[in-house]
Image: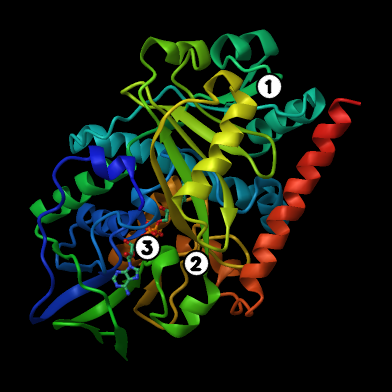
Amino acid sequence: MERIYYRATAGESVPAGPLKADIHAEIAIIGAGFAGLATALGLVERGRHDIAILEAQQVGHGASGRNGGFVFGGYSLGETQLVRQQGPARAREMYRLTLDAVQLIKHRCRHYRINCDLNSAGIVLADWFGDRRRMRQKQDFMNRVLGCRWEWLNQPELRGRIRSARYHGGLLEPDAAHFHPLKYARGIASRLASSGVRLFQDSPALNITGRQGAFRITTPNGSVSAEQVVIAGGGYLHGLEARTSRAILPIATYVMVTEPLGSRLTEFLNCEHAVYDTRFAFDYYRPLPDTRVLWGGRISVRDPGPAVIEKWLRRDLARVFPELAGVAVDHVWSGLMGYPLHKMPIVHPLQPGLWTCIGFGGHGVAPTTAIGELTAAAIADGDQRYRWFDDYRLPPAWSGLGRAGAQISYWGLQTLDWFRDRRRFQ
Ligand SMILES: Cc1cc2nc3c(=O)[nH]c(=O)nc-3n(C[C@H](O)[C@H](O)[C@H](O)COP(=O)(O)OP(=O)(O)OC[C@H]3O[C@@H](n4cnc5c(N)ncnc54)[C@H](O)[C@@H]3O)c2cc1C
């Protein structure tokens, strides 16, 4: 059985029951993950309140209530590919949306008094391979081309903070943050409820019919008629709107949380940064306020179950911090990331008034806020910036081999990591 740390520590759940009537709303949103919630809040902040949100389970049930909590710029598509595909000027604008989203999330935490353990200590990219030249190139690319301000950490500086012999130097993204994602999701949902937004939990959307101005969404015990609809079901869509569902591949990734380490924590993490590394198949981890370490990594297309996940992640943890090999693990879970083939969010309307806000993959905390803003601005004000994402419309369906392909490509990337790692020791 999954033991999700966030659920055990988020406090009160959101008090919203299922839809049991036929109602009307100007805008209906399907999914109460970060994408749906950010779109709704963007609409409310632009004066639109006649909104109904349908959530199949509970607020934050999906990736948004299970993720690593890293709040940083960028998309699932890597930044060099983004620049190659869009050119430097447009790529910089698109990347800027996510940097602004990081600041907007921080602002919303303050403004709406959302207590979600927000920690603004920044995020470190740790150099696994000892490739100083590549790290310098990366820093230069991020700062000069994309307008970031990543700081150089040499080896002694890094090891003073992250006490592992595994790493060489690192790059610090000081404007980034980490937080308790489920507390954040619930905080936004409460804010929406107090603004008059109607939220229904345990209310899966079963189908969508109609056209702009007259859509109808059916749930098991009621329906919503709406002028506009936003589909924001992440990797949990499971068949709703066939074309969209087929274009999104749900891929699982894993997280565990150790027992509280007390004063021992600083023997390993003498800082409050969240950390990931330069491998394709990287680890990601961060200290929690109660001195536990949250540790994540790996992907898989099958469900191996908590015991196997714990074994995998423990092994990864011990490679970085061998002294923690025997630490007790109190929480283990998995979550689904929704990947389109092009690895970019899909924000283009399927038909007038039927929007998608989907496809964030494994890098979605800030991008969901960025794209939620674009979607809200398009609906409320006719803002056309969503068209920056025109190249990333609904891609072709994943074939039956999609899952296998994703797994094989991950194993391939792991193998490349292994070769680079081996070269380092030769
Ligand atoms: C384990 C893990 C770690 C991650 N770590 C990070 C990280 O540290 N930083 C980062 O930037 N990104 C991270 N990600 C990715 C990030 O969490 C996601 O990209 C993001 O949360 C996606 O948000 P979403 O709203 O699109 O989808 P979700 O959060 O999955 O929400 C979709 C919601 O829609 C609901 N839904 C689906 N179908 C229906 C329907 N028919 N009717 C009604 N409701 C429906 C679901 O129940 C769900 O609640 C991680 C992902 C995972 C799984």
Residue ID for mark 1: 167
Which amino acid type is marked by label 1? Answer: Tyr
Give the colouring mode of the picture. rainbow
Work out whether residue 357 can be spotted: no
Quadrant hosting residue 132: top right
Q: Tell me which residue sits at (33%, 45%) in the image.
A: 4
Q: Tell me which residue sits at (24%, 80%) in the image.
A: 227
- In the rendered image, which quarter contains the C terminus? top right
Q: Residues within 10 Å of mark 2 (few under 14, many from 20)?
A: many
- Residue at the outermost right position: 426
Q: Earlier in the sequence, mark 3 or mark 2?
A: 2
Work out whether residue 10 can be spotted: yes
Residue ID for mark 3: 375
Q: Earlier in the sequence, mark 2 or mark 1?
A: 1
Q: CA distance from mark 3 to mark 1?
A: 40 Å
Q: CA distance from mark 2 to mark 1?
A: 36 Å
Helix, strand or loop for disc 3: helix
Quadrant hosting residue 205: bottom left
Q: Tell me which residue sits at (35%, 67%) in the image.
A: 382
Which amino acid type is marked by label 3? Answer: Thr
136 w.r.t. 338: above or below: above
Q: Tell me which residue sits at (69%, 27%) in the image.
A: 127
Q: So how many labels did they put on this image?
A: 3
In the picture, measured across the screen, residue 262 lies left or right of residue 53, that is right
Q: What numbered label is drawn on residue 346? A: 2
Depth order, front residue of 251/191: 251
Q: Earlier in the sequence, mark 3 or mark 1?
A: 1
Q: Are marks 2 and 1 in contact (CB under 8 Å)?
A: no
Q: CA distance from mark 3 to mark 2?
A: 11 Å
Helix, strand or loop for disc 2: loop
Which amino acid type is marked by label 2? Answer: Ile
Mark 3 or 2, which is nearer the eye? 2
